[in-house]
Amino acid sequence: MILLDVFKWTKMRFIRGIFCKFVAIKMAKIAMIEKINSLKAEIEGLQAANLADVEALRIKYLSKKGEVSLLFNDFRNVPAEQKKEMGQLLNQLKNIATDKINSLRDALESVDTDCDGIDLTRTSSPIKLGTRHPLSLVRNEIISIFSRLGFSIADGPEIEDDWHVFSSMNFADDHPARDMQDTFFIQRNPADVLLRTHTSSVQSRVMEKSQPPIRIICPGRVYRNEAISARAHCFFHQVEGLYVDKNVSFADLRQVLLYFAQEMFGPETQIRLRPSYFPFTEPSAEMDISCNLCGGKGCSFCKHTGWVEILGCGMVDPNVLEACGIDSKEYSGYALGMGVERITNLKYQVKDLRMFSENDTRFLDEFKSAR
Ligand code: DAH
């Protein structure tokens, strides 16, 4: 009797055990299917704002420790008879996740090329590069030539007083340049304030502040009360040169002028000096160069003379040295002054002076290839 009961009890436990195991397997399967389905729904609804989000989603679902990959780990415990069915479901989930993440990435990558409404794939419109103004090109070249000879650059104001522009430069009180017809006056009497008519004013600015040796060039804009035409303008540009030291001679000046002319216009260039007059130099000269168009043979440009005038020069008048506080018995010097427009005209044959200040880009573009 007891034996029968024990048997019954054992059988019951066995059956119950089998039943429990069966239920557990069923439950595990259901749980896994549920997990697969919920992941599927979750993945299908995924959104990403940028590529970094997409990468975060890939890590979350598909990396080694990602949620889909972890399900594959659980797959090891799935009973053999369920492996086929569960395997298919899992593969399907992995494909859905891979496709979804790829499509999110593709969509964002195509949006990225059109970032913020800018289509980066569009052919660019050419950027119009500016050019150096021909006057700047020539001024820079003049500066560079004189720098090689040891000249440094000095500067002075465009709005000047009478003393620096005229008196210190040995202009007579009744010199016509002091006339309103030639000079733009800003204020007359008690002190004259005016727009400088030449860069020679920088000579006195430098000499009143420093003692020789002085070796400077002064590039700058000057103003004259002229009617504007092809050959004259109310403003233009000059470069002034000044060298003051002991025993400076006219021969020094001539050699510097020859060097300058040959550096600027080519090694074949010849120079000639004609006597002239300037209040601030004695003796004074004007320098011509052999015509750089016809090589000195004569053409319409040089009016068939073979020569073209390019600058004024001379030995600094002792009165100028003394007015600026330099002992003219101990020191001598030379000075020179040239118009940048004139040199540019000779180099590039610009016939009309007005072209330099009209900012016509068709004209300026012609100097694109110049240094
Ligand atoms: N200042 C003169 C002018 O404006 C140019 C000039 C001539 C400058 C002779 C000089 C010089 O230094 O020596 O026309």
Image (tube, helix red, strand yellow):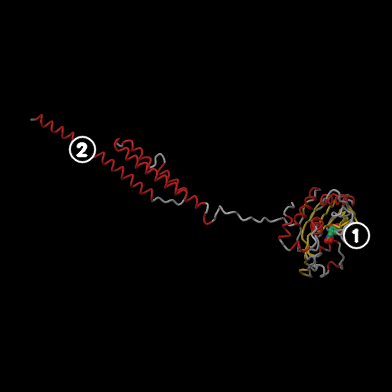
Where is residue 191? Give x, y as percent.
78, 68
Tell me the crowding category of disc 1: few under 14, some 14 to 19, or many 20 or more residues within 10 angstroms, Cα based. some
Relative to 14, 34 lies left or right: right
Residue 73: image quadrant is top left
In percent of width and height, residue 47 lies at 42, 51
At 50% from the left and 51% from the top, the residue drawn is 110
Residue 185 visible here? yes
- Depth order, front residue of 8/186: 8
* Residue 327 in view here: no
In depth, the one of 227 and 63 nearer the eye is 63
Which residue type does callout 2 highlight? Phe
**In-front residue for pair 313/167:** 313
* Residue type at the position of mark 1: Ser
Mark 2 or 1, nearer chain start: 2
Q: Which residue is mark 1?
A: 276
* Residue at the top extreme, as displayed: 3
What numbered label is drawn on residue 26? none
**Residue 19 has which mark?**
2
Question: Is residue 223 left or right of 255 when viewed as pictured?
Answer: left
Which of the two residues, 259 or 102, is positioned nearer the viewer here? Answer: 102
Q: Secondary structure at mark 1?
A: strand
Residue 212 at x, y = what percent? 83, 51
Q: Secondary structure at mark 2?
A: helix
Expressed as whole percent of the image width and height from the top left, the position of residue 217 reads 80, 54
Mark 2 neighbour density, 10 Å: few (under 14) some (14–19) many (20 or more): few
Question: What is the spatial separation of the Cα atoms under label 2 and label 1, in whole angstroms?
Answer: 129 Å
Total numbered badges shown on the rendered structure? 2
Q: Are marks 2 and 1 in contact (CB under 8 Å)?
A: no
Looking at the rendered image, the disc whose residue lies closer to the viewer, 2 or 1, is: 2
Q: Quadrant of the N terminus?
A: top left
